[in-house]
Image (spheres, helix red, strand yellow):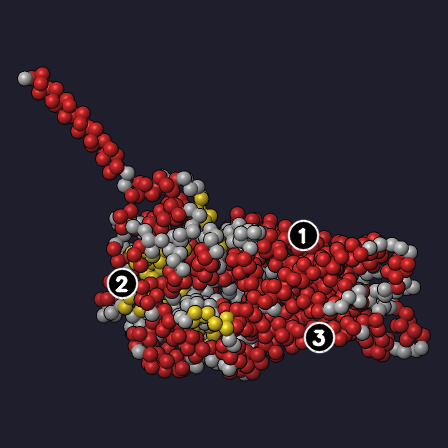
Amino acid sequence: MPNQRSLVIGISLVPAAAIVGLLLIPLWISVRVESDAGVSFGLRAYYALFSDPFSYRTLFNTTVFSAVAVLTALFFGVPSAWIVERTNLPHKGLSFTLMTVGLLIPGFLSAMGWVFLLHPRIGLVNVALSSVLSAEWARINIASPVGMGFVQGLGLAPLAFIMVAATFRSTNPELEEAAAAHGIGFIRSLIRVTLPLIFPGILAAGIYILTIGLAAFEVPAVIGLSNRVFTFSTYLYTQVHPQEGAPRYDLAAAFGVFTMAVAGLLSWAYFRVLRQGHRYAVVTGRSYRPRQVGLTRGGVWLAWGFLGFYFVLGQLLPLLTLLWSSFLRYFQLPSAAAFANLSLVNYRGLPWPHLLDGLWNTAVLMISVSTLVLLVSLAISWIVVRSKARGRFLLDAVAFLPHAVPGIIFALSAAYVALFLLRDFVPIYGTVFLIMAVYILERTSFGTRMLNNALAQIHPELEEAGQVMGISLLRRMATILIPLLLPALVNGWLWIALLTYRELTIASLLVTPANVTLPMVIWGLWQTGSFARAAAAATMGLIFMTPFIFCYWFFGRRLAPGGWQA
Amino acid sequence: MGRTAALVFLVWSVMLWCWETPHAAESAQSPLSKLVQAAKTEKELTLLGGGGTWGDADAQKALENGFNRKYGLAVRIKFVPGPAMPDLARRIADEFKAGQKSASDLFLGSESHFVEMTRSDALPRFPWRETFPHIPAAMVEMDGRLLREATRYIGISYNEQLLAEKDLPRRLDDLLNPKWKGKIASTPYAASFDRLASVIGLEKTRDFLKRFTQNVAGLIRCGEEERLASGEFVLLALNCGNYEAERGRRQGMPIGARVLSDVPIVGYWYVSVPKHSAHPNLATLFGGFLLTQEGQKIRYESVGATAHLIEGTPANKQYKELQAQGIQLKDFTSEYVIKNGKTLGQLRDEFQKILQQR
């Protein structure tokens, strides 16, 4: 028994130690001052960062952008999750696919799509509006912190959906049934019973999305950077990627340390909720059948209308824009001339051997990273939620940190370690294993958030019963915990695989010709100004991913208890 | 006597043959031949860079075929869509410091991208002119560490469909006209404005930028001609070289470019083979090939960039045209940038901040 417990602790401590090690590197870089006189240590980078008024404007933009992103994501994600998990809506499998298919579109291409839909001068919607209303105010400007936050939020709504759906799926029906028995109406029950029950799930999703917003890069880079609306990530980008001269790693690192501090505060807020997790424990050994709300015919139409609205706005429009631009030499609004220019030239000009190499490496990463992240996350979450180990909340905070630290900082540290510290012992620079290791550490934050939440909702009495019967820890995990966690694990696995498929910020610093990933091929094309060809590559990526999406839909609806009988 | 003479002649001939043969063989083995022989032992060349660096798939095929044809090789050139030039330059320098092989066998970038590699001593000297006699002496810089590959005339790029010839700016101050407000773009890294300061003076450049930024609608990177073609912006000032318009036109985009009469700035693309290149001989041979007439022709047809010091190239013709217009072009070489790195860096930081203000 003690050995099994040590194994679980070991599985959780190794990645935690690696995370701490990697995150100490930016701290070290931020206080390291290099000059002609040599190397010294000081707070010059922090002074430069916080004495610049531009930093505060950037901070304001980032705050507005992140807040709007959270609100937008929850606005679409929470009702969608409720509809899919807690109602008897027909064809739920389809709705699940509709909510998540947009994840396969890289964020920067969606953002490009939105630029061309709502650009003040050439945006399709604005051109239409200006033909009806000549007033300047009638134009919608996407190039603002609010506009960017809205686009980012649309992209993050599936994440809110997935995270909150897991909570809805486990909601105890007894409380709602008791409310109904006492004559409390549906709306009042929803507000007074259901929403408080799932509050930790919503809060967890909100915190998670907020931290994504703080570090989000693609949407601010495509929409904001070119319109001089800076968030911290694009400010950081300009410091780390100067066209000329040396990069300001010290400023970037100081920024990384600042976001780590913010992440610490967010973690603290999250843990306060988690500490009271027992109040929300809704899956017990006595009953576990989520109640389904019967929808009227009008309700079905309303539900499908809401899901369809999100699908069109958040997924279809960017997807169509992506497809449209992939057939053009450069982006043009639909017109007779544009239709005459449609061709397959972008597809013909793709670097096919490289694209296929990238596809293979990405597939390997998706499978291995998802599996290993869940293994590590289960060990950490079990210690955090189930054990009474001292420092368990510190362990959870450490697991959460990579999520909040900008990926570019994390990748810089990893590249530094692989190049200069590990080269003689573990020569993994330039291999797919380096990317795999960093992805695992980075994604552990997601895995632990999801499993913390799921574990908090499974009452420990089931495991305690197993323990009384003398069943060993690993066997209890395998026979009691994992079957109960299966929906969350399947969701988590598929979701981590999707995040791995999309990831490029980290890969951009770790990829070499020998370990290129599919998003990096697309990113390489976009970064060098080949937008149309990048759109063609992304479309091919979507086609390659179709079988995966099918699996997502197929397994998801079968493994989830009580849900998605499409 | 006759027999003796015949014997002496025979001995003399044998001696002469013995003496001449190795020398004749040696002269046949020119530096270029030796390089080709060495290159034949390396089967593959890896080149990182974006579409703007190595062109599209057709251009890459043309480069591979032209290179193999020129030197009787059968090598595969693996063109890998890579990061932007500054990022790649930094990576190559880091890989050198870490004792790793370079991700790219050869690096192509502007004069500023070699600063870190030079500082790290990652670039070897190479006798380019001994090996490739067709290369003009002025194209070899930094004791053979760098080779000029193409000439960049700095100016403005614009959408030809949205701007008529008569409306185009001709001088720097024309960009301050309020008619451009909200329509034009500049670069986030204030490209070439640091060079401009040494042409028109620091105060004048600073004053210009403070007024210019009022008209700027956004910041885009060089190479993003698609954003001009789509009409998102009508004009980019200053660009990274007029060749970008040529490249855009070849891809069917309505992009034009021109040099402003009071911005006579000339920059260059350079190639260099890092010390830690995995295939140094092939990479060196390829660098020399880019400056042959065949190489320059392929480069012009793919990315629009050629070297003005090579007679007959489009860049050479443009150089003569600009001189005929009375524009006294000023060179900004890698040696200038490396020597003035600190000052230029401070100017860039200041100018970038001005351009970031709305």
- In-image side of A369 versus B272 (left or right): right
Q: Are marks 2 and 1 on the same chain?
A: no
**Residue A129 appears in the rendering:** no
Location of residue A160 (image quadrant): bottom right
Q: Chain of mark 2?
A: B
* A362 shown above or below A390: above
Task: Name the front one of labels 1 and 3.
Answer: 3
Location of residue A233 (image quadrant): bottom right
Question: In the drawing, what numbered circle is on residue B319?
Answer: 2
Quarter in which the N terminus of chain B is drawn: top left
Q: Chain of mark 1?
A: A
Residue A503 lies, in percent from the top left, at 60, 60
Question: Is mark 2 in CB contact (under 8 Å) with mark 1?
Answer: no
**Spatial separation of the CA atoms under disc 1 and disc 3:** 32 Å
Q: Label 3 sits on what residue type?
A: Trp
Q: Chain of mark 3?
A: A
Q: Are marks 2 and 3 on the same chain?
A: no
Residue to which mark 3 is pinned? A268
Camera-nearest residue between B290 and A343: B290
Camera-nearest residue between B108 and A418: A418
- In-image side of A419 versus A456 (left or right): left
Location of residue B333 (image quadrant): bottom left
- In-image side of A482 versus A344 (left or right): right
Residue to which mark 1 is pinned? A367
